[in-house]
Image (spheres, rainbow, N blue to C red):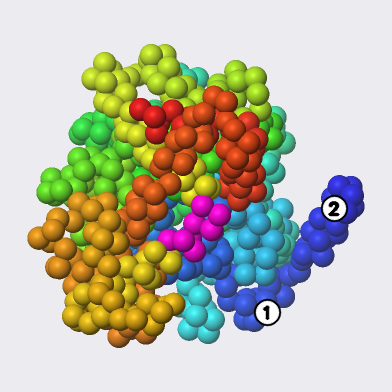
Amino acid sequence: MDILDRVKQYREEEDRLKWEGSFAEYLELVKERPNIAQSAHSRVYEMIKQAGVKEKDNRKLYEFFGNEIFGLESAIERLVEEYFHPAAKRLDVRKRILLLMGPVSGGKSTIVTMLKRGLERFSRTDEGAVYAIKGCPMHEDPLHLIPNHLREDFFKTYGIRIEGNLSPLNQMRLEQEYNGKIEEVRVERIFFSEDKRVGIGTFSPSDPKSQDIADLTGSIDFSTIAEFGSESDPRAYRFDGEINKANRGMMEFQEMLKCDEKFLWLLLSLTQEGNFKAGRFALISADELIVAHTNETEYRTFISNKKNEALHSRIIVMPIPYNLKVSEEERIYEKMIQESDMAHVHIAPHALRAAAIFSVLSRLKESNKQGVDLIKKLRLYDGESVEGYNQVDLEELRKEFPDEGMSGIDPRYVINRISSTIIRKEEPSIHALDVLRSLKDGLDQHPSISDEDKEKYMNYISIARKEYDEMAKKEVQKAFVYSYEESAKTLMENYLDNVEAFCNKTKLRDPLTDEEMNPDEKLMRSIEEQIGISENAKRSFREEILIRISAYARKGKRFEYNSHERLREAIQKKLFADLKDIVKITTSSKTPDESQLKKINEVIARLIDEYGYNSISANELLRYVGSLLNR
């Protein structure tokens, strides 16, 4: 569809969604759909919930954040379950400012932006429809028209609680335009829009000397005082502050803790009582979610100031740490690159993963748990199975350091270095070593990295390089085997047959001659030695494998190649050991013969077709792995 047709379709859809009627007609809508009278917090929670919720590893995954926020499932679950959910149920949590606290480039602003854009879309749906008194600059809730003495009866009839009082301007309009007849007051459907300043506001602090509280609460329109005769006439007041315009929706308070104190005190009344003071009027009601964000250093400074104690209890702090999963970190970089004009550049497989390993290592803390080094921890966090550790160990590791992820290398630094690599390299292909080299070079230019941290980060780059070396070797060795998975599976089945015969003290039958034969001890040991199983330990290892097979059988599951981490490693190493000489000779030969050349071309074709390389990166990989194997 042509873009102009889409614009026209959007405009027609908005016209279709528009609604206007009397307050009496609005009440009929409320009878049919009580959800249209929900609070701002309830609307946000419903928006998140309706996008979908999945269960994984006893955690709730909220799909609303799924395409933008990566690796922060725990933080998002806590945000929704400890703030939005209770706030939607009118518990006291809704009377708190939501403060997202975390390191730079951790996703705080992205979460707030998603909530704002989400509300804009949600207000255009039946479930998120919002209605307001027509002509009101604050988009006031029409139910404020119900007098206080009738609200208890209204709750009994409709099951809806009314909070807040009619604003000074609408109080005057009710009397002058409608002669006090609330049933005749005009009501319209509104659509949230940050650009049009409807239901979504953003406040950013500037110079304390020049910034006025009117930026939040509105101001007197001096040009109309002569017409209306008084500064206390609501018609002479501009209700155009961010608090006014964000009513019914949400307001983002950027860098809240950098604000002048008078701005923060205004929030005390707004959050606790749901109203604020403006001009020469009585308190003005407002129903809105206030979201602020800051970093940990500023927050610590803020709470250390005794003058801010009254605000402490009015704030709910939600830590938003860095992602600690390598696979999710990769997705962050992929997303950033896809959003640029350089999305066409070929980035070789594992290049972003190598960078992600470095980033995540810088954010992890050394565990006090015996035998758990940073690499094991990194793998466990990423959902990989590590022999000897289970889900309980993983939960213990997560609880060991509650502030883990609140420091380390931020994604912006990494993407800056990847961007530099993309621009500088002439051929349209980026290799893992290019990225790691650029990360290393960038440490010298980073103004906030101390010498101590620099030494630590250099070590993490070395670890990431070693991890990449292993990935590269495995990739090439797999490519040399026409059907790697099939070969691994065949080798495993052969090993298991021999193990079963050994443990049960039975014989095997030769598939060709049908003769009975003893278990192949040489085959079993050639596999077990790959992972350091000694002669004395071989029996217990083999019995452990049989027990695992029985456990799988009882659960109705099939024991697969990946079902036992150490056996999988042993099979893999055995396959690679058998291949090593062939790979070494073929990849490092300066003048390959015809058969070697044919094999190289087959492997390159497989790397391109099945593993995601292009011809440049495939050739680079083969040369690099050849040099590794010859060291």
Q: Name the residue under label 2.
A: 6
**Pointers 2 and 1 in contact (C-beta within 8 Å):** no
Which residues are the magenta region? 481-488
Q: Where is residue 272 in the image (x, y as percent from the top left)?
A: 36, 53
User: Is 316 drawn above or below residue 455 in the view shown?
Assistant: below
* Amino acid at dot 2: Arg
Query: Judging from the image, what secondary structure is the residue with disc 1 in?
Result: helix
User: In this rendering, does residue 367 appear at all?
Assistant: yes
Of the numbered discs 2 and 1, the one sitting upstream in the chain is: 2
Does 152 sit above or below residue 169?
below
Disc 2 or disc 1, which is closer to the eye? 2
Rendered location of residue 288, percent (x, y): 50, 53
Q: Nearer the viewer, residue 26 or 564?
A: 564
Could you tell me how far apart the alpha carbons at marks 2 and 1 are, in whole angstroms? 34 Å
Which residue is situated farthest in the left direction here?
536
Q: Quadrant location of the N terminus?
A: bottom right
Residue 292, compared with residue 138, is above or below; it is above
485 inside magenta stretch: yes
Q: Nearer the viewer, residue 324 or 216?
A: 324
Report x, y in % for residue 26.
Answer: 68, 72
Give the quadrant of the C terminus.
top left
Residue at the image point whose x is 27% and y is 21% from the top: 455
Q: Is mark 2 on a helix, strand or loop?
A: helix
Residue at image point 29% right, 62% down: 523
The residue carrying mark 1 is 28
